[in-house]
Structures are given as C-alpha cells and as structure tokens.
Amino acid sequence: MPRFTGDNISFTNATVKTLVVPEGKKGKLWSTRRSQGFFIRKFKSGKATYGVKHVCRGQQRRITPGPELPNNLESMRKLAGDIAAKARTLGTDGMEVRQSAAGLPGNPREGQPRRDPASALPR
C-alpha cells in the first residue's frame, strides 16, 4: 500500500491509514477533492482527526467533528458537510454552538467595530 505525503488526495478508509507525517514536522493537513473544506490532520504521534474549514458570517473557522477511527470516514464527511451547510445557509456558527453548550462565553468583541492598529501607537 502506498504512503501518501501529498496535500490533496481522495480519502478512503484505506488511504487514511497510510497517511504519513513528513520527517521533522509535528503534524500535517490533507484535504480532499470530493468534499470542499473537509480535511484530515495527522500528528507525528499517529493520532489523526477530521476537520472542516468554512466561513461563517465573514469569519473563517476550522472545526474538528471527531477523531479518525476505523471505518468512520463517511459519517465524519457527512457531519462536516452538515456543519458547513448550516454555516453557509443559516449562519449557524458551530464554534459558538459548542462554546455555549460547554458554558463558555462567546467572543467579547463580537459586534464591536474593529480598531485601527495605527491608532493604538503612542503619539
């Protein structure tokens, strides 16, 4: 079975097992051609997680739906698609949903105008 070190590959349960982190790196991201925004992050330790990259209300997000386990590729791909679709159509931010479920406060600056970094310089 070949070992994959490229960035953009077709994911199957067999190819996920053969992903190899390059020497000298802590981890690596691989994306798929089939599902836009869906990726796998694998660490040098061998641990791997699935993720989805999407934009919600102008803010780029990366969310990890779950770990890589035997034969759970299709369920994670569907879950990642659902997360991205909710963000795209309903404006539902999966990160905010997870934070509120965990009892964590949201972004304290949300809704406030952005400051100009030049105005923070001493005069």
Image (tube, helix red, strand yellow):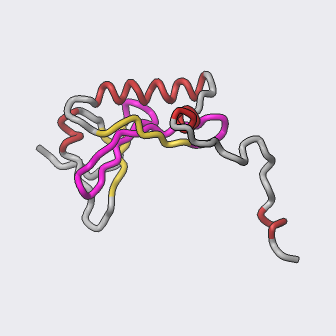
Question: Looking at the picture, how far across and down is residue 65, in whole percent?
Answer: 40, 35
Question: Number of labelled discs?
Answer: 0
* Residue nearest the observer in this picture, 95 or 55: 95
- Above-or-below relation of 20 to 58: below
Residue at x-position 28% and y-position 35%: 11
Question: Looking at the picture, how far across and down is residue 78, in whole percent?
Answer: 38, 24
Q: Bounds of the magenta span?
A: 33-60
Q: Going by the picture, which residue comes out furthest to the left? A: 1
- Which image quadrant is residue 32 in? top left
Query: Is most of the magenta stretch helix, strand or loop?
Result: strand
- Above-or-below relation of 42 to 50: below
- From the viewer's perspective, is 54 left or right of 65? right
Question: Looking at the picture, how far across and down is residue 82, in whole percent?
Answer: 47, 24
- Which image quadrant is residue 1 in? top left
- From the viewer's perspective, is 43 left or right of 115? left
Residue at x-position 62% and y-position 42%: 105
Residue at x-position 42% and y-position 30%: 80
Question: Looking at the picture, how far across and down is residue 8, in whole percent?
Answer: 35, 44
* Residue nearest the observer in this picture, 69 or 39: 69
Q: Going by the picture, which residue comes out furthest to the right? A: 123
Indicate yes or no whether the magenta region holds residue 117: no
- From the viewer's perspective, is 48 left or right of 118? left
Indicate yes or no whether the magenta region holds residue 36: yes
Residue at x-position 76% and y-position 41%: 111
- Above-or-below relation of 94 to 7: above
Q: In which quarter of the image is the C terminus?
A: bottom right
Q: Going by the picture, which residue comes out furthest to the bottom? A: 123
